[in-house]
């Protein structure tokens, strides 16, 4: 709630994207997604690879953490909902991923167990995440345009860890709140255009819709999020 981009550097991000494989093990980034273009690698192992489908074990960060104190320092106004709130740590997980390949499209679904570690102030969380995504490639002249749609389920323990309010966090601006499990639906368009042999231009827009009960938390003021990005990639 009430958090915005206030400084010029809030609009910029550098990312190092690695794609490597060795005897079934791999490090990769999702080249079809706008959100992966600025980071978000996956480490995994190929269990089996068939002509039209693949089964992998994946290790990755599924949810970002946040520090309320750091957020408040970066804002131009006070945010009473965050004052005195404990830090929320990132949640990393291990997943079994099934991928299905089509002529110009791919569908994958992850069944993951994610864990947010002890934050030193009490509390951690372990829960199930089911993450699915479909991406369709439409080549147009020198453009690669990807149309995507995704649906993600988050276990109650994880949702409550990030946007719930524990008894020791209650204040006049922050009542006690126990969150339920939640869903996120996403629609996305992502495009890449080669500028030279090493440089490429990329841009994308992602519209996220969270389940209605998400914004019932005193820490949240909306359940829809639009993200737009432009950038360049250097390949070496």
Image (spheres, rainbow, N blue to C red):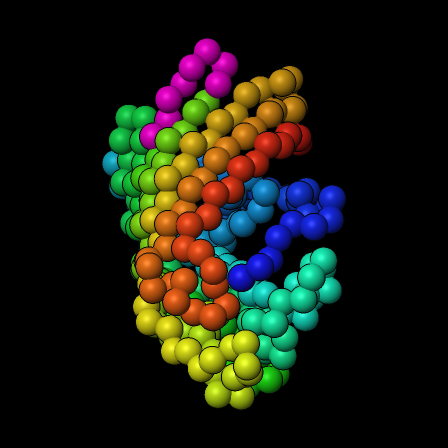
Q: Is residue 88 left or right of residue 95?
A: right
Q: Is residue 171 magenta?
A: no
Q: Is 145 located above or below residue 32 in the figure?
A: above
Q: Is residue 140 magenta?
A: yes
Q: Which region shows up in magenta?
A: 136-143
Residue at position x 34%, y 30% in the image: 136
Q: Is residue 30 visible?
A: no
In the rendered image, the quadrant that contains the C terminus is top right
Residue, far front? 172
Q: Is 215 located above or below residue 205 in the figure?
A: below
Residue 30: image location, x then y, percent = 47, 41
Residue at position x 68%, y 42% in the image: 12
Residue at position x 34%, y 40% in the image: 149
Quarter of the view holding residue 76: bottom right
In-front residue for pair 57/166: 166
Residue at position x 44%, y 35% in the image: 32
């Amino acid at each position: 709630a009430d958090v915005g981009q206030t400084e010029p550097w809030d609009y910029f991000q550098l990312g190092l994207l690695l794609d490597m494989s060795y005897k079934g093990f791999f490090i990769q980034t999702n080249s079809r997604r706008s959100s992966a273009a600025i980071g978000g690698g996956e480490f995994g192992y190929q269990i089996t690879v068939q002509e039209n489908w693949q089964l992998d074990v994946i290790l990755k960060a599924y949810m970002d953490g946040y520090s309320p104190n750091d957020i408040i320092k970066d804002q131009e106004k006070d945010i009473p909902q965050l004052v005195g709130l404990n830090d929320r740590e990132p949640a990393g997980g291990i997943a079994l991923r099934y991928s299905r390949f089509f002529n110009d499209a791919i569908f994958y679904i992850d069944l993951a167990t994610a864990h947010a570690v002890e934050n030193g102030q009490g509390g951690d969380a372990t829960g199930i995440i089911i993450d699915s995504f479909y991406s369709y490639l439409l080549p147009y002249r020198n453009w690669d345009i990807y149309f995507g749609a995704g649906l993600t389920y988050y276990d109650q323990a994880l949702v409550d860890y990030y946007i719930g309010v524990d008894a020791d966090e209650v204040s006049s601006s922050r009542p006690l709140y126990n969150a339920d499990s939640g869903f996120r639906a996403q629609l996305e368009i992502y495009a890449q255009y080669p500028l030279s042999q090493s440089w490429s231009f990329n841009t994308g827009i992602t519209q996220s819709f969270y389940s209605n009960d998400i914004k019932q938390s005193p820490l949240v003021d909306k359940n829809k999020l639009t993200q737009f990005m432009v950038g360049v990639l250097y390949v070496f």
